[in-house]
């Protein structure tokens, strides 16, 4: 009787464009899923690539108060705000760097809307306008990890406005050695940026490095079609065995 009633209620909501789901299951909240898959890890090491002004830092610290977070933001102006916002948050180190597939320097196209700033030209579905070009330092995550003595990354978050595949290519050694447990990233389906990596390219690259897609999360639509969303991947090795704790 109860199951029948719940089905009727759910069907009624679906008829008006909504859904009703049971709370607390995998696929509902990316940060809850990270906490679930890290199985009680209290002090994870997190790389926050494309930190902007620290929005992700807030979510990560709410989920993992003891986390060590390295936040990458290449724009000098945005980095200044990030540094200010994170100054009193323990365990957070901001870096005025971009991550990519090779070490060097690249022209960053700084947008009037900082969340549209990218190495890629904006496409027809983008917004804002390029206000200046800034040459910024780029490092591979493999090199960064070697320099900082980082052997294991619990969460790699990448939100680099269409540049995420290049970030992952620069972490090829970490990925191949199964030294990243979770990857949380954005993927675009609309033409927000010219020449940005497509979903199938990112999916193929990560699954080819022993990762499995956990879920898509909040979806954003443009012109009544899917524009972009976030997704979480888990390394197959660490989905079967305990995730190593960060050394104290």
Image: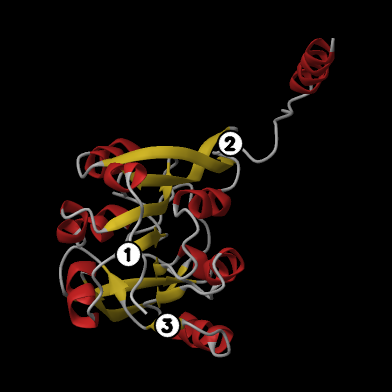
Q: Which is closer to the viewer, label 1 or label 3?
A: 1
Q: Which is closer to the viewer, label 3 or label 2?
A: 3
Looking at the image, which residue is at 54% across and 84% down? 86
Residue annotated with mark 1: 153
**Disc on the earlier residue, 1 or 3:** 3
Q: Residues within 10 Å of mark 2 (few under 14, many from 20)?
A: few
Q: Left or right: where does residue 35 sit relative to residue 146?
A: right
Residue 105 in view (yes/no): no
Q: CA distance from mark 1 to mark 3?
A: 16 Å
Q: CA distance from mark 3 to mark 2?
A: 36 Å
Looking at the image, which residue is at 17% across and 73% down? 143
Quadrant showing the C terminus? bottom left
Q: CA distance from mark 1 to mark 2?
A: 37 Å
Q: Residues within 10 Å of mark 3 (few under 14, many from 20)?
A: many
Residue annotated with mark 3: 94
Q: Which is closer to the viewer, label 1 or label 2?
A: 1
Residue annotated with mark 2: 223
Residue 168 in view (yes/no): yes
Q: Residues within 10 Å of mark 1 (few under 14, many from 20)?
A: many
Looking at the image, which residue is at 83% across and 15% down? 2
Question: Looking at the picture, does residue 7 appear above or below residue 156?
Answer: above
Q: Secondary structure at mark 1?
A: strand
Residue 181: image location, x then y, percent: 33, 54
Question: Looking at the picture, does residue 176 appear above or below residue 119?
Answer: above
């Amino acid at each position: 009787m109860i199951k029948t009633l719940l089905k009727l209620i759910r069907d009624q909501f679906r008829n008006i464009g909504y859904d009703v789901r049971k709370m607390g299951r995998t696929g509902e909240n990316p940060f809850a899923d990270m906490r679930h898959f890290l199985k009680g890890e209290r002090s994870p090491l997190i790389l926050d690539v494309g930190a902007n002004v620290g929005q992700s830092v807030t979510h990560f610290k709410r989920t993992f108060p003891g986390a060590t977070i390295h936040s990458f933001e290449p724009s000098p102006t945005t980095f200044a705000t990030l540094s200010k916002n994170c100054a009193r948050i323990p365990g957070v180190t901001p870096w005025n760097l971009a991550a990519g597939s090779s070490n060097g320097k690249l022209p960053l196209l700084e947008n009037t809307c900082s969340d549209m700033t990218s190495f890629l030209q904006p496409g027809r579905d983008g917004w804002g306008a390029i206000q200046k070009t800034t040459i910024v330092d780029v490092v591979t995550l493999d090199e960064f990890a070697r320099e900082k003595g980082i052997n294991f990354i619990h969460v790699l978050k990448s939100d680099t406005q269409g540049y995420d595949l290049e970030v992952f290519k620069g972490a090829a050694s970490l990925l191949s050695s199964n030294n990243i447990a979770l990857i949380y990233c954005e993927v675009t389906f609309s033409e927000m940026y010219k020449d940005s990596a497509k979903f199938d390219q990112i999916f193929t690259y990560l699954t080819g490095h022993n990762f499995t897609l956990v879920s898509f999360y909040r979806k954003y639509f443009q012109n009544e079609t899917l524009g972009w969303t976030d997704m979480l991947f888990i390394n197959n090795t660490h989905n079967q065995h305990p995730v190593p704790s960060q050394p104290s």
